[in-house]
């Protein structure tokens, strides 16, 4: 069975084609700059070589068509005919309260998903464009939606509600939803397989640390709390996002700077975080280089970034009533030993003992990085959201 996974952003489409008999990726790539000058498709050939194909891509349907034609092209193709694709799985960002698991996409489901557009005005309409594009080109192919918010739907009400007038929840659905759910679900399940333990009875804290970052508290395989909120702006300090901030500071800045809601959203989402504090970059690799050169603001940004992660691990250990496994994933979590080392430093009182020698060698691979006598297992598990989307799609087709 072959499954195509699509992740459609406002001006990009990432894709992976899986052969599910071996769970192997047989084609992958992405389109950038949709609707802009200089749009292109970048694909990875089986030998690992990258190839860039330039083409004018004014909108998503033409983009999806370009991807499908590339998949069957004599030069770069991975399959002979589009009939070989059994289904398409989509990353869908915000499923609100309607979706607590992945679903086969039909008219009714898509209407319910569209009703969540207010909650993710940048992402949901883009996800929908991908679905519509596939429907236009391959009208008979089954499509499955896998929602970023679904895994967090098991949170209790006292964890997801905000302490604002209750009618804000009733009228507009204002509450914590959480994101990166597909990643948190994949790694929390995978770490139990890796360690050979049953998820039931385990208290796990999963740290998805990348340009966007979130942490989840997972008990018996179910999420009980997570750092992101109504939007992906709450929680950790991120590449360009502020994370937690006093709401009073937000209105104060709006008044002083004469900003409207779009202006303040732009400031908090795109100009804050690591970039805003360091003034260097939103990329942690560039930040670490600036720290090594003694840049004081970069050093401050790095300390703030790690401190926020550490603080949430402590909070979630309290919420879980202890912790058995702490897991790092995402671009930074998987690849930067400095982040893991700083976060776990001086945490012995919680039963966390990192093996610094092992930790320093681990990049993007599954590994236990705590010492043999550490009460808490600290583990690196690379995330694979696309594989989970493909697996969910296959499971739904078999029902």
Image (cartoon, helix red, strand yellow):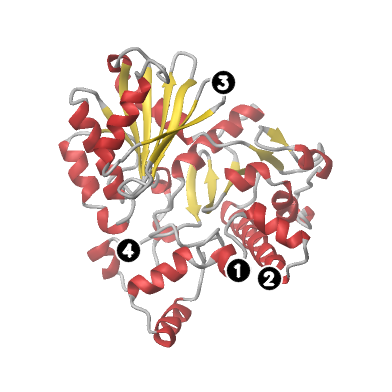
Apparent side of residue 314 relative to residue 120 in the rendered image (left or right): right
What distance separates the C-alpha of mark 1 from that of mark 4?
A: 33 Å
Q: Position of residue 278 (x, y in %)?
A: 63, 67
Badge 2 vs badge 4, beta-carbon distance below 8 Å: no
What distance separates the C-alpha of mark 2 from that of mark 3?
A: 41 Å
- Mark 3, residue position: 47
What distance separates the C-alpha of mark 1 from that of mark 3?
A: 38 Å
Badge 1 vs badge 3, beta-carbon distance below 8 Å: no
| Camera-side mark, 2 or 4 | 2
Badge 1 vs badge 2, beta-carbon distance below 8 Å: yes
- Mark 2, residue position: 297
What distance separates the C-alpha of mark 4 from that of mark 3?
A: 47 Å
- Mark 4, residue position: 174
Crowding at label 4, few (<14), some or many (≥20) Cα neighbours within 10 Å?
many
* Quarter assignment of residue 266: bottom left
| Earlier sequence position, callout 2 versus callout 4 | 4
Residue plotted at (40% across, 18% down): 77
Q: Is residue 204 visible?
A: no
């Amino acid at each position: 069975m072959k499954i195509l996974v699509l992740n459609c952003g406002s001006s990009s489409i990432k894709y992976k084609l899986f052969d599910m008999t071996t769970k192997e990726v047989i084609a992958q790539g992405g389109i950038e700059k949709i609707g802009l000058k200089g749009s292109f498709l970048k694909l990875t050939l089986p030998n690992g070589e990258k190839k860039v194909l330039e083409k004018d891509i004014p909108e998503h349907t033409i983009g999806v068509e370009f991807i499908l034609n590339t998949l069957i092209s004599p030069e770069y193709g991975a399959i002979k005919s589009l009939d070989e694709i059994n289904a398409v799985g989509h990353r869908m960002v915000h499923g609100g309260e309607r979706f607590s698991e992945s679903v086969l996409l039909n008219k009714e489901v898509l209407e319910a998903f569209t009703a969540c557009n207010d909650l993710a005005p940048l992402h949901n309409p883009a996800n929908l464009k991908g679905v519509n594009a596939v429907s236009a080109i391959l009208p008979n192919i089954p499509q499955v939606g896998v929602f970023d918010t679904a895994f967090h739907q098991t949170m209790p009400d006292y964890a997801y509600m905000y302490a604002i007038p209750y009618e804000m929840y009733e009228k507009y659905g204002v509450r914590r939803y959480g994101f990166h759910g597909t990643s948190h679900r994949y790694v929390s399940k995978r770490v139990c397989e890796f360690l050979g333990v049953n998820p039931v009875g385990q208290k796990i804290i999963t740290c998805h640390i990348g340009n966007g970052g979130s942490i989840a508290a997972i008990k018996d395989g179910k999420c009980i709390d997570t750092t992101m909120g109504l939007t992906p702006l709450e929680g950790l300090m991120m590449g360009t996002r502020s994370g937690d901030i006093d709401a009073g500071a937000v209105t104060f800045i709006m008044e002083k700077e004469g900003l409207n809601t779009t202006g303040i959203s732009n400031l908090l989402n795109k100009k804050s975080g690591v970039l805003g504090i360091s003034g260097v970059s939103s990329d942690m690799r560039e930040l670490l280089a600036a720290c090594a050169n003694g840049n004081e603001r970069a050093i401050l940004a790095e300390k703030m970034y790690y401190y926020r992660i550490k603080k949430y691990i402590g909070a979630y250990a309290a919420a879980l009533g202890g912790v058995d496994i702490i897991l790092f994933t995402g671009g930074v979590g998987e690849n930067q030993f400095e982040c893991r080392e700083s976060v776990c430093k001086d945490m012995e009182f919680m039963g966390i003992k990192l093996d610094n020698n092992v930790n320093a060698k681990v990049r993007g691979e599954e590994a236990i990085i705590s010492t043999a006598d550490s009460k808490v297992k600290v583990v690196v598990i690379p995330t694979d959201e696309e594989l989970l989307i493909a697996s969910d799609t296959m499971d739904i087709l078999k029902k």
